[in-house]
Amino acid sequence: MIPESFIEEVLSRTDIVQVIGRYVKLQHKGSNWMACCPFHKEKTPSFAVNPSKQFFKCFGCGEHGTAITFLMKFKGLSFPEAIKELADDLGMEVPEDRQAKIRQARAKTLTDYLAQAADFYHQTLFHDRHAIEYLKGRGITEETVKKFQLGLSPDAWQGLEAIFKDKAYDDPKLEESGLVIAKDGHRYDRFRSRVMYPIRNPRGQVIGFGARTMVPGEEPKYLNSPETPVYHKSQELYGLYEARDAIHKKGRAIVCEGYMDVIQMSQGGFLETVAALGTSITPEHVKKLFQLSDHVYFSFDGDAAGFKAARRAMESTLSIITDTQTAHFVLLPQDEDPDSLIKSQGPEAFEAQLRSAFPLSKFFVMDIVREVSQGQGLRTAEERAQAVAIAKPLLQRMTAHALRQLLVQEFAAAVRMEPAEVASLCGVTLLDVPQTKPAKALSGYGRDTKQGERSKRPVRPVTTGPVFTNIKRRLLQCFVTHPSWLIKYSDQIEYEMLDTVDEWEEAIVRLWHLAQDHSKGEGFEESKLTTGYLLSFMQGDPLYNRLADLASEEEVLQTPEAVAEFEIKCAFLKLEKAQLDAQIAELLSMEERGEPVESQYLERLFKRRQDIHRSLIDESSQAVDFVLDSRLSG
């Protein structure tokens, strides 16, 4: 695990303009640096990098984030990998324990050996006419062979001795990398006389191989590298490294079933295609895909095995997907796969399949109904009960609350139940959306005759409801955009919000604690407390997306700093005024009931309320004057 103090130092020394500028051609315009977005196709630059906030935002597709987020999305790196890359650029060595360094050194040696083998297999292919004719017969071009570095393992027990000479072939690391098998005192190549498909990690390193026989009927048809220190099939996707740029440009990722599908799809123009490595789609796979794009399409054959694979992909997706992401499911016609469909009907036929794909919500309902009733529809109470039982663990694993609520509603219609009943049976909570009700007429004239009864009810939190939600949402947005104000307005936050009454106050307090912790660090400089710096420490937190979205929204608003500070001052005044109004109302109710009330205390509350009212007018006037002066001088 990377120490937090090291991450702080890396972030404080990182310049987001330099990081992004290595991959995108930036031009200086005003306070920002602009470019054509690397995450979608465009001709007019709408991708802005803000050095003062250490934050990027595309005004075309909406992608936004920090230097770390950029590397994770653009290169498909994990958080630790992104930190390591930033550290490498700064000439800093990531502090790791001794065992971690040993593992890293060993992994480097293994990837070196695997890269040598990939080069060897690739060269061998071009000297074997039978293999070349086989690939031509499958419709694979020389350009594709080079792009994916396809190769051929020699028809020999120890073919790798040609590059690992002398005693190198006896090196245990060849066995550890999965290239060589040691058995009964003998060593021999794992892959012999097979077409070789190198498997790469997001950094482009060869970490394993898929190998296909060229002999009809030979089993196994595909032979894959075993699990090794550098290769874990449940975490890697074939073609992800090669597809990364296309995924960014097209704004989507397509997942199919095998190596050959990826290659044929690539030749058909679907460069954004990847495949699992002989295993079902896992949550780790889905997480990697959503790091690169918010839109993922799963394509499977329309047979029983295809439906089974699609179900597993759906299950993995449910636990990862957020409310801003989409997943679609393509189930191809019987006896068709992407390869055969594109060859027989052309790329447009597959594009049509993508356009008519089932969204996750529809596939969720359809697949459960199909499983229970074999496609006949839910006809009995028993079948509907069985459908609810299947849906229960799937709904419980979801963290996308809005999507889950809508999904419950669609599923409830299919099982002929109320959404609340489905939610209760499945053990999930629906969001409480307040319904607007018409006001009831008062029975008295000029006076509410129920006032006495209401005064006896428990007092509700006074800073909740839609008005205060908007105030606190804006307050949070200002603090995300200007994190140093979390220190400047520390007293107000501590006074108003430590007893949090809603999610907005809780978010502000969490940011306040984070800023407080970092401000106490040795050598802390307030100028380093930027939006990007703060968000980087929220990476992986459920709150991150909300904060990043607020920062992204402010990039569009471009509120002048002075106006934003007026808003913060007014927000705290309004929150304090609401508290005073509640206290005054409670005291007046007590007085009406004949209970003793300290008049001087009530008078002080009225005076403070009047002072706040004047302050709000003054702050609003100053904000208006500032805006008018800015426009007149501009």
Image (tube, rainbow, N blue to C red):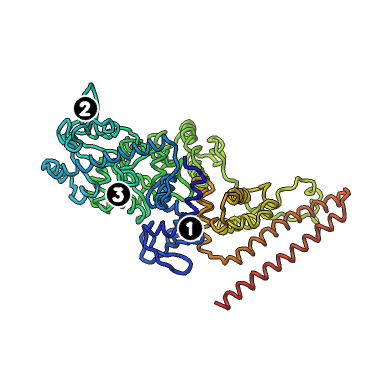
Name above or below for residue 148 compared with residue 193. below
Label 1 neighbourhood size at 10 Å, few (<14), some (14-19), many (20+)?
Answer: many
| Residue 115 percent location from the top left of the image | 26, 42
How far apart are the two marked residues, 1 and 3, measured between alpha carbons? 27 Å
- Of tags 3 and 2, the one toward the viewer is 2
> Which residue has dot 2 on it?
187
Dot 3 falls on a residue whose secondary structure is helix
User: In the image, what residue type sits under mark 1?
Assistant: Phe
How far apart are the two marked residues, 3 and 2, measured between alpha carbons? 33 Å
| Residue 104 percent location from the top left of the image | 37, 39
Q: Residue furthest top?
A: 184
User: In the image, what residue type sits under mark 2?
Assistant: Arg
User: In the image, what residue type sits under mark 3?
Assistant: Glu
| Residue 357 percent location from the top left of the image | 36, 48
Name above or below for residue 222 compared with residue 137. above
- Of tags 1 and 3, the one toward the viewer is 1
The quadrant of the rendering that contains the C terminus is bottom right
> Which residue has dot 3 on it?
242
Is 297 on the left or on the right of 585, as rendered?
left
> 142 and 458: which one is in front?
142
Is 409 on the left or on the right of 327, as rendered?
right
